[in-house]
Amino acid sequence: MPSEAGTGATGNPARVEPALVQITYVGHATVLLELDGVRVLTDPILRRRVVHLRMLCDPPSPSLLGTIDAVVVSHAHRDHLDVRSLRRLDPGVRIIAPAAALPSLRRRGFGRPVDAVEAGDAVTIRGVDIRATPALHGRPGSAVGFLLRGSATVYFAGDTDVFPEMAGLADPLDVALLPVWGWGPTLGPGHLDPERAVEAALLLQPRVVVPIHWGTLHPLGMSGRSFLTEPPLVFARLARERLPGVAIRVLQPGESAVLTVARGFVR
């Protein structure tokens, strides 16, 4: 895809160096991202059971995840904000969460410093801009997504339904981490299912979509149900039909990938 940056010394179009984004889908909404050497963990759930929900497999220990520069929290629901998981991380890790989540953190006894943000606020870590974005989930302002900008641009939606402003969220957008389900056999309001995730991708126009928020947490006694495995496959099938120019990368919980975001030639 052409972009504006100039030409080489000979006057010929210069090739843009591809950006590398390393992604580990830990499970549910927990993703470890590495962009330009900055490592960000999203909505960490790092223990086997949260309230009435159980993980299909043991989550990784923080030592296996390695150094983490920042944690972003999208909202205060227990399957996204787990204080016991946050306490397992190094005390020096920077935590970025919506201002609306602070009362819940304090009620649960979490006393470490938190960067409280609202949609539009940004934190910069070693040249990578981490900006809170709107989300349509729960009460207005209670949830956010996050947009990471460096040599590539990555959108972590958190929990949200489709909203019109997705169309102007980032241009270009390299990678979108989009939820395609939840933790039970049905979804409540404020979520994306496979069809709604395709609608979101049509607005966002990312180069790559990685479906998240599936296949990990389940209510007790529901470990073998189809809702744990089918949503990303349905999303991928629908996306191939309606998003022919978008790459879909389905990662299983625990799987990692390095995505090469090639922006083509510079004119």
Image (cartoon, grey):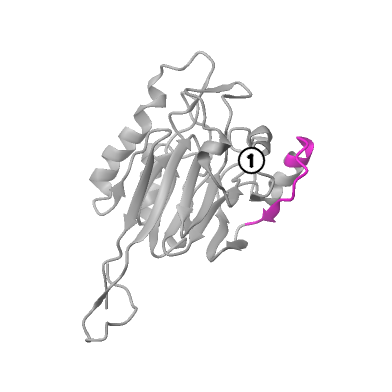
Q: Which residue is at a point 36% across and 49% down the rendered structure image? A: 258
> If the image is split into quadrants, where does the C terminus sit?
bottom left
Residue 135: percent from the left, percent from the top? 55, 50
Residue 105 in which image quadrant: top right
193 falls in the magenta region: no
Label 1 belongs to which residue?
89
114 falls in the magenta region: yes
Q: Nearer the viewer, residue 160 or 25?
A: 25
Residue 179 shows in this picture: no
Q: Which residue is at a point 41% across and 18% down the rendered structure image? A: 225
Residue 140 shows in this picture: yes
> If the image is split into quadrants, where does the N terminus sit?
bottom left
Residue 54 in which image quadrant: top right
Span highlighted in magenta in the image: 105-118
Residue 147: percent from the left, percent from the top? 51, 57
Q: Is residue 77 above or below residue 240?
A: above
